Image (cartoon, rainbow, N blue to C red):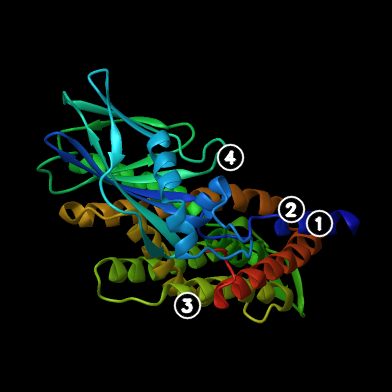
Amino acid sequence: MIRWLLLAALFLCAPASAHKPSDSYLSLRGEPDGVAVRWDVALRDLDYVLQLDRDGNGELTWGEVRQRSADIEKLAVAKLAFASQGSACPLAPAGPLTLERHSDGTYAVLTLHARCERLADILQVRYAMLFDVDPTHRGLAQWTPAGAAAPQALVFAADSAVQDLKLAAPSGWETLRQYVVEGIWHIWIGFDHILFLVALLLPAVLVRQQRAWSPSPSLRAASVDVLKVVTAFTLAHSITLSLAVLGLASLPSRLVESVIAASVVVAALNNLRGTIDRKRWVMAFVFGLVHGFGFASVLADLGLPQGALALALVGFNLGVEIGQLAIVAAFLPVAYLLRSTSFYRIGVLRFGSLAVALLAAWWFVERAFDLAPS
């Protein structure tokens, strides 16, 4: 029993901010004399590094941010560097610091310009924001070469902090590849999406008989159940993701994030009562419609190339599906082998679902009442 409780407790150690990791957003635009830069950095990240909250009340005011604008710009210039043909392109502020609200809080918006004396075919960029204190931080960049209609998506991470920008416009295949990778990455770090899917899949290797869970008679039966759930979830979130990206439908971000957390609670609690057994695909479809809006908000924050919108949308959706299938491929064989054990039926299904429900309930409170740090 203690071992099962400890395993369940591991779920509670997952990060509380389930949907959004630490990201900053860069818009880089090629110009004849260098690069125009817009850089959105979360105030919570800047506060962690620069201690902007002078009075220590846990709330940042515009006055506190404005007083430290020079320090914020100095940090930005130190953490972002451009070079062309071996020569540095000095980076300097090109406009006043402003604030903008993103789906996960308030961001400082910096306007900068890198001036290059000589521009060649390749421009090298070095990004170093927050990697020394948060190795999971990423810089999500949109690079638009001079005269190009569609930007190129780039992701700066601890292991890809230095990248080359091509002054020529990217090909369609390159755009597709980039958004496939981003879709895979998002589903793997989207803990709420993963927990919703896993909560729905946990009973797939079991059958409900006389108000109790029993082992599924065959791998084929379990696989069919998994296929129904995954297909319903995929179809639903693909519909709303496409509608949202095309501007045909929208929902408030706070509502979407709250309902996503609630969906995890409902899916996990259903495993304890078994109210919905073989029609969990219906639950997957209904809540999947809302999860699609969550995917859309991330895709919007990443940035969409208007000249290659269809490719970006298809690539991101394809990446999400690849990420989902990888999770299913890792889950199903192990769950099927363990389905007859008390460890799985009690330790994993019962206590694991309870732990997931408690964690997701906290996410719901945090999001519904806007308790997340700004």
Q: Residue at x 66, y 82 (%)?
A: 275
> Residues at badges 1 and 4 in contact (C-beta under 8 Å)?
no
Which label belongs to residue 255? 3
Q: Which tag, 1 or 4, sits closer to the chain's start?
A: 4
Residue 354, image x and y in percent? 74, 69
Q: Residue at x 18, y 39 (%)?
A: 30
Q: Compute the Cα span from label 1 to label 4.
A: 38 Å
Q: Relative to 200, does residue 167 appear above or below in the rendering?
A: above
Q: Amino acid at mark 1?
A: Phe
Q: Which residue is mark 1?
A: 343
Q: Which residue is mark 4?
A: 133
Which of label 4 and label 2 is nearer to you?
4
Question: Left of 348 or right of it: where is 283?
Answer: left
Q: Amino acid at mark 4?
A: Val
Report if residue 120 is visible in the image. no
Q: Which residue is mark 2?
A: 338
Q: Compute the Cα span from label 1 to label 3.
A: 36 Å
Is disc 3 placed on a helix, strand or loop? helix
Is disc 4 placed on a helix, strand or loop? loop
Is disc 1 placed on a helix, strand or loop? helix
Q: Amino acid at mark 3?
A: Leu
Q: Compute the Cα span from label 2 to label 3.
A: 37 Å
Which of label 3 and label 4 is nearer to you?
4
> Residues at badges 2 and 1 in contact (C-beta under 8 Å)?
yes
Residue 10, image x and y in percent? 74, 54
> Residues at badges 4 and 2 in contact (C-beta under 8 Å)?
no
Which of label 1 and label 3 is nearer to you?
3
Residue 146 found in image quarter: top left
> Residues at badges 2 and 3 in contact (C-beta under 8 Å)?
no
